[in-house]
Amino acid sequence: MSGKGTLVVVGGPTAAGKTPIAVSLAKHFGTEVISADSRQFYHAMRIGTARPTSAELQGVPHHFLGHLDLETTWSAGEFARAAEPVLQDLIHRNGHVILVGGSGLYIDALIKGLDPLHLSDPRIRTVLQERFREEGLSPLVEELRIRDEATWRRIDRQNPHRVIRALEVCLASGRPFSEQRTTPTDRKDLRIVRVAMEWPRAELYARIDRRVDGMMADGLLEEARSLLPYRELNALRTVGYRELFAHFDGEMTLEQAVSAIKQHTRNYAKRQVTWLRREASWTSIPPEPKIAIQLVHGQG
């Protein structure tokens, strides 16, 4: 077994049961959890992001969970810079750290570091954001497809921030975003164990549908209504809120909105699975704590 500290990364699609596994691992190894789910960073977005309850956390400290105001924009780089001292402290004290989340970019930022590219041009970004407000997302997505099909295929095309950022780099540099990406490798100062929760597709989709029904029963409609004044913020241009805002606008019935949330969440889960499969070092397991613990002990 290596003498390095161990970072256990718990991944998987939404509704796959990552939190119970992360909590079980943290309890077993006497450590804490760093959350890398970008949707759960914002304290006002509780129900719509299925943020774990206090009971589900079982007293295990979770860092970067509900700590941001809606107006705050946080990037993967900012997350990595903030999480690094927490990671180092937990490794020093406990030897193990659990990193959990479905946001692949944020996980990679902490494990691999960031690409050095990413030219930034505020003027171009302002123009793109104005186009988004006036024309919607579809024209920007189509322009990205024309300029950089590789990135168009890879990113979350329903996330305005991601689409605008990729187009900004294309326009600022004159080259496709994908051509400028490097292939960073894992950091060498830690032993990294990746554990992915795996479900048969039909079961995962059924779990997603049940989760959405549960969120509605818990008050998602009321939460979304309370957040209407902030609907233009990046944090709220996400599945769950976007569909209900459309319902409030009279564009669809509540039943149609709930159905759309389920479908869009399934689409998101599919993209998460695709992201996991691109990295061969993930080990897919059923969501059983004992199996996850044995895997961490067995890899060295």
Image (spheres, rainbow, N blue to C red):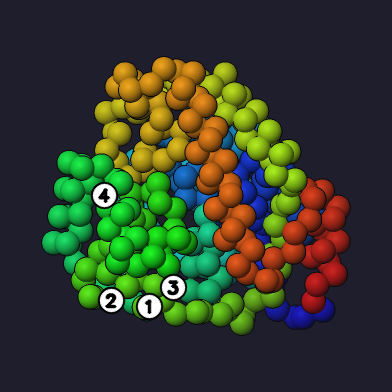
Find residue 116 and report its horizontal and vertical position in percent: 37, 78
Taking 55 as reference, is 160 left or right? left
Tell me the tag on residue 179.
1
Q: Secondary structure at mark 1?
A: helix
- Contact, mark 4 vs mark 2 (Cβ under 8 Å): no
Q: Which residue is mark 3?
A: 114
Q: Which residue is mark 4?
A: 139
Q: At label 4, which amino acid type do we have? A: Pro
Tell me the tag on residue 134.
none
Q: Which residue is mark 2?
A: 175
Q: Earlier in the sequence, mark 1 or mark 4?
A: 4
Q: At label 2, which amino acid type do we have? A: Arg
- Contact, mark 4 vs mark 3 (Cβ under 8 Å): no
Q: How many marks?
A: 4
Q: At label 3, which amino acid type do we have? A: Leu
The residue closer to the viewer here, 66 or 226, is 226
Quadrant in which the C terminus appears: bottom right
